[in-house]
Image (cartoon, grey):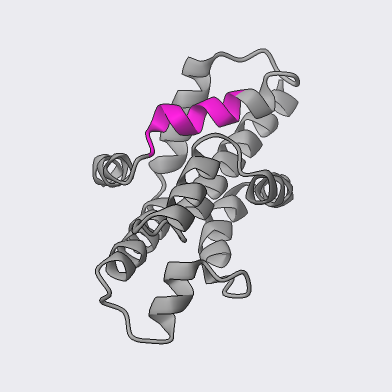
């Protein structure tokens, strides 16, 4: 199922390497890591069934909204990525929850600054017919979890 998740993310414009680059940028000042190490950590996060389920669910909702297959008012809420909706963040936080409170801190930062592919997807969702209401937050969750995993591994050494 990990391969399906990766393929779906790629079809939506986000690669594992895009995600790993953000992990690398966030962690490089704290631990001696490489981009390859970050890619492996992102892939490990994507092996977890609860992560796979969250990503597939969020992408499906984004795709249904693009095709106008959700009922109103949910359709407009998802298409406009309304700030008070919050369900997209809640789904993504289920990913960060795997690695504890450090994941929540990382998620909040990423959701605010929207670096790398996160920002690209957010902007594309606001300026085109594409909907990335869930995917940008899910990627925040994956990055936050991978950063937390790296931090936990570093503290164990």
Residue range of the region highlighted in magenta in the rendering? 14-24
Quadrant location of the C terminus in the rendered image: top right
Which residue is located at x 28 percent, y 69 percent? 64
Seen from the viewer's position, the closer of residues 28 and 101 is 28
Seen from the viewer's position, the closer of residues 39 and 44 is 39
In the rendered image, the vertical position of residue 56 relative to residue 142, given as above or below: below
**In the image, 141: left or right of 45?**
right
Residue 87, image x and y in percent?
A: 53, 71
Quarter holding residue 66: bottom left
Residue 39, image x and y in percent?
A: 45, 25
Residue 50, image x and y in percent?
A: 43, 56
Residue 62 on the magenta segment = no
**In the image, 80: left or right of 114?**
left
Residue 19 on the magenta segment = yes
In the rendered image, the vertical position of residue 89 relative to residue 98, given as above or below: below
Q: Residue furthest bottom?
A: 72
Residue 71, image x and y in percent?
A: 33, 85
Seen from the viewer's position, the closer of residues 15 and 144 is 15
**In the image, 57: left or right of 114?**
left
Which residue is located at x 42 percent, y 26 percent? 17
**In the image, 112: left or right of 63?**
right
Q: Residue furthest front?
A: 127
Which residue is located at x 65 percent, y 49 percent? 107
Which residue is located at x 51 percent, y 65 percent? 88
Most frequent secondary structure within the magenta stretch? helix
In the rendered image, the vertical position of residue 86 relative to residue 28, given as above or below: below
């Amino acid at each position: 199922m990990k391969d399906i998740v990766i393929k779906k993310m790629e079809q939506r414009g986000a690669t594992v390497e895009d995600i790993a680059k953000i992990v690398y940028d966030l962690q490089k000042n704290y631990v001696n890591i490489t981009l390859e190490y970050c890619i492996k950590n992102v892939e490990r996060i994507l092996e977890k069934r609860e992560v796979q389920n969250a990503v597939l669910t969020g992408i499906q909702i984004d795709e249904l909204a693009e095709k106008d297959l959700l009922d109103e008012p949910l359709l407009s809420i998802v298409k406009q990525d309304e700030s008070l909706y919050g369900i997209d963040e809640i789904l993504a936080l289920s990913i960060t929850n795997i690695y504890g409170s450090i994941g929540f801190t990382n998620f909040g930062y990423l959701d605010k600054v929207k670096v790398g592919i996160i920002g690209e997807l957010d902007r594309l969702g606001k300026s085109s017919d594409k909907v990335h209401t869930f995917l940008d937050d899910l990627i925040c969750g994956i990055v936050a979890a991978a950063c937390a995993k790296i931090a936990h591994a570093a503290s164990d050494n």
